[in-house]
Image: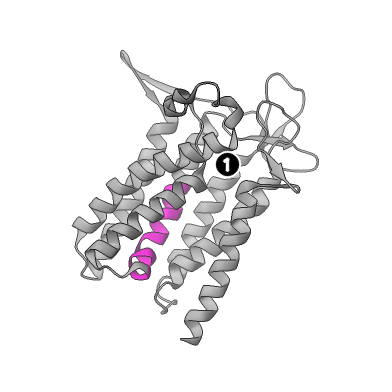
C-alpha cells in the first residue's frame, strides 16, 4: 500500500503546514481534555492555560536541542542552523523532558500536587501525541525499515519495496493507550497511577516500534548505540522508573 504524502494545505495565497497544524491540534485536544477533568476536580483552568504555554515553548526548545545533539555533524559548522526549526528536525522525548521540567517548576511555584496534575494530563497527552504523529505520517517523516513479512508501509524514493510507516504505528499505539487510560480512569485510585501507566505503556510501545525504523539509509537513520536508538535507551529508563514508582506507591 502506498500513501500519498501531504506537506501543505493551500488556502488561497496561504499554505498551512500539515505537520504544524496537527501538532497544534493535538496539543489543543490535550488541553481541552485536561481542563475538562480539572474542572471536575475543582482545579482552576487557568493553571492549565499557563502550563500549556510553558509546554509549547519548552518542548520546542528541548526537542530541537535534542535533535541538534543527535545530529551534531549537521550543525557544528553553522550553529545558527539550530534555530531553523521550520526546516524540520525535532526529537519528541527531548521536548517531553523539557516540557516536564518547565511544568514541574511552575507547579512548585503554585504549590500544586505534581502527580495529581500529571494524572489529569495523562489521557490528553496520549490523544495529543496520537494526533501529532498523524502529522509526521502525512509528511512522510520517520522512514521505516523494509517490510519483510507484514506491516503497513509505503515506497520511499522510487524503491520497489515497502517500508514500515513508523509514524502511523506510533499514532495508533498512542490512540490505543488513550482508550486504555479512559477505561482505567475510574479504576486507578492511587495518585500518580494514571500518569505512571501512561509512561509505562508509552515506553513499551515506543521501544518496540523503534526497531522498525530505518537503519539502512544514510540520510534517514537514527544513530544507534549497542543496537538501540537513544529513544529506546530512554524508554528503558522511563519504564523502569514507572514500574518502581508504581510499586512504591502501592506500598505507601
Badge 1 element: helix
Quadrant where the N terminus sits is top right
Instruction: Specify whether 166 is left or right of 86.
Output: right
Magenta span includes 166: no
Q: Which residue is mark 1?
A: 168
Q: Is residue 27 visible?
A: yes
Label 1 neighbour load within 10 Å: few <14, some 14-19, many 20+: many
- The stretch drawn in magenta includes residue 122: yes
Which secondary structure class fits the magenta region best? helix
Q: Residue at x 19, y 56 (%)?
A: 46
- Report the magenta residues as a range: 115-129
**Can you give x and y, in whole percent of width and height, for residue 8 in the image?**
43, 22
Extreme residue in the right direction: 148
Question: Residue placed at 65% from the left, 30% from the top?
Answer: 220
Foreground of the two, 202 or 152 = 202
Q: Is residue 51 above or below residue 68?
A: below
Total tally of numbered discs in the picture: 1
Write the residue at 45% across / 50% down. Answer: 96
Between 82 and 13, the one nearer to me in the picture: 82
Amino acid at each position: 500500500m502506498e500513501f500519498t504524502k501531504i506537506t501543505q494545505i493551500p488556502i488561497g495565497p496561504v499554505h498551512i503546514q500539515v505537520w504544524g497544524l496537527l501538532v497544534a491540534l493535538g496539543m489543543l485536544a490535550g488541553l481541552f481534555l485536561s481542563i475538562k477533568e480539572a474542572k471536575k476536580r475543582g482545579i482552576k483552568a487557568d493553571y492549565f492555560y499557563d502550563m500549556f504555554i510553558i509546554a509549547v515553548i519548552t518542548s520546542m526548545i528541548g526537542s530541537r536541542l535534542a535533535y541538534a545533539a543527535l545530529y551534531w555533524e549537521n550543525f557544528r559548522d553553522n550553529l545558527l542552523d539550530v534555530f531553523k526549526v521550520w526546516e524540520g528536525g525535532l526529537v519528541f522525548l527531548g521536548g517531553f523532558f523539557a516540557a516536564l521540567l518547565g511544568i514541574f517548576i511552575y507547579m512548585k511555584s503554585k504549590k500544586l500536587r505534581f502527580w495529581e496534575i500529571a494524572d489529569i494530563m495523562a489521557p490528553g497527552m496520549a490523544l495529543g501525541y496520537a494526533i501529532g504523529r498523524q502529522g509526521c505520517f502525512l509528511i512522510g517523516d520517520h522512514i521505516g525499515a523494509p517490510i519483510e513479512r507484514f506491516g503497513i508501509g509505503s515506497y520511499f524514493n522510487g524503491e520497489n519495496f515497502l517500508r514500515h510507516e513508523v509514524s502511523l504505528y506510533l499514532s495508533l499505539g498512542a490512540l490505543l493507550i488513550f482508550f486504555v487510560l479512559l477505561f482505567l480512569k475510574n479504576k486507578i485510585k492511587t495518585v500518580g497511577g494514571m500518569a505512571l501507566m501512561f509512561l509505562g505503556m508509552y515506553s513499551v510501545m515506543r521501544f518496540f516500534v523503534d526497531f522498525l525504523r530505518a537503519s539502512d539509509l544514510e540520510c534517514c537513520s537514527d544513530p544507534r548505540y549497542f543496537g538501540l536508538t537513544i529513544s529506546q535507551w530512554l524508554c528503558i529508563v522511563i519504564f523502569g522508573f514507572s514500574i518502581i514508582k508504581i510499586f512504591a506507591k502501592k506500598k505507601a
